[in-house]
Amino acid sequence: MRFRDILYMALFALRGNWLRSTLTALGVIIGIAAVIVMVSVGQGTQAQLDQTISRLGSNRIDVMPNWGRQGAVRMGAGSIFSLTMDDVEAIRERIPEARFVSATVRGGAQVIQAEQNWSTQWQGVQPDFFRILDWTLSAGDEGELAGFDGTDTVVVLGQTVREKLFGEDDPIGATIRIGRVPFTVVGVANPKGQSGWGGDQDDTVFVPLDTARRRLMGQMQLPPGTVQGIVVGTASSKDMAKVEADLNAVLKETHKIPPGGEDDFIVRNLTQLVSARNETTRLMSMLLGAVAGISLVVGGIGIMNIMLVSVTERIREIGLRMAVGAGPKEIQRQFLAEAMMISLGGGIIGIAIGIAGALLAGRIGALPVELSFEVIALATGFAVATGLFFGYYPARKAAQLDPIEALRHQG
């Protein structure tokens, strides 16, 4: 018997009990749809997290004062300033893999332009800061960033500040005041969006480090030569571990910290964030695998159950077919084809519902969604495999029936 004839007979048999066949496929439909939705949302979330990490600077290491505790005394934020410009120069001179190094200071202030004003934070940085965090300009001359040093009263605006102060107007060359100090706008940074900690990275203004130290930090009593943080950028992520170890060694030496003594600085990078992402992805994959496995097993058991019932109901039909020349293999192929049709049909419906559900989750739930052809192909493969696996036993049972006993059966 040709394969096409087997498929036709299987389809004819299923049409005779279409409602039962549809209900049988329900387990596969739900399982496949759930997998499509969860994998699409999971991939979308992972892609969004990757973009966030990239925006934060994937090869970035932060050095901060250890203001959490000094000896047995808990210190308040900003109460100690253990990092200095000498540390910055030591890092530049002694750690060649530290390709970019920038000291930073920061504070909050009211920024004023004409009748507009906005409360935001300012950051005093050096030119390398823009390279480490991959900040580029949407307006203004990029060459201004290379000369973003010294005591010039110039400023680069984040997009949020630009929108609040200038709206759609061109701010380049305009004068704004940070507190009482006038600055000339020389650039507008490209938008970065939300940070990994939920803050708006564009709600900031950048000023040269020395200018910030002299003009904006006067009332904050910053000790001479000290900075609030150091940002280090490496050329490659492969250098991160070595640079981090070298930073600890150099700062322990310059700060004269004895072996076993408590550091007055903290070195951190995004490795922990990347590791947390990888662990989250691994757990999510395991969860999805478990959900998919349970759903498909339940659906497969339903298919096996109904196929066994179908074999029992059609024993006399099987006997008649064997009596007119059908062999065991043809009987087995027919019932296997019926099981696969139920499973594959359920899989196709499940894929359609899953895609619609994922798009709905993205539109109504504002969840990040990323549909991929690989997931759809994998779901189709699982649907076919479920039909083959759980349909094999009923089909084999039908093929092993004795023709004489089958003809005598009074169903």
Image: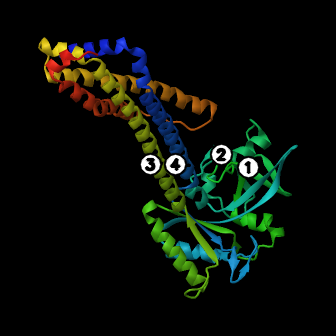
Say the numbered circle drawn on residue 286. Answer: 3
Q: Dot 2 corresponds to which residue?
A: 140
- The answer to which quarter of the image holds residue 100 is bottom right
Q: Which amino acid does the dot numbered 4 rest on?
A: Asp
**Residue 408 in picture, x, y percent from top left:** 19, 16
The amino acid marked with disc number 1 is Val
What element does badge 3 sit on?
helix
**Mark 2 or mark 1, which has the lower sequence index?**
2
Front disc: 4 or 2: 4
Query: Pointer 1: what residue?
Result: 185
The part of the image, by quadrant, that contains residue 191 is: top right
Question: Where does the image place residue 281, in percent across and percent down from the top left?
Answer: 48, 50
Q: Which residue is mark 4?
A: 50
Disc 1 crowd rating (10 Å Cα; few below 14, some 14-19, many 20+) is many
User: In the image, which is nearer the foreground, mark 2 or mark 3?
Assistant: 3
**Which mark sits nearer the N-terminus, 4 or 1?**
4
Of the two numbered discs 4 and 2 on the same chain, state the one appearing first in sequence. 4
Is disc 2 placed on a helix, strand or loop?
Answer: strand
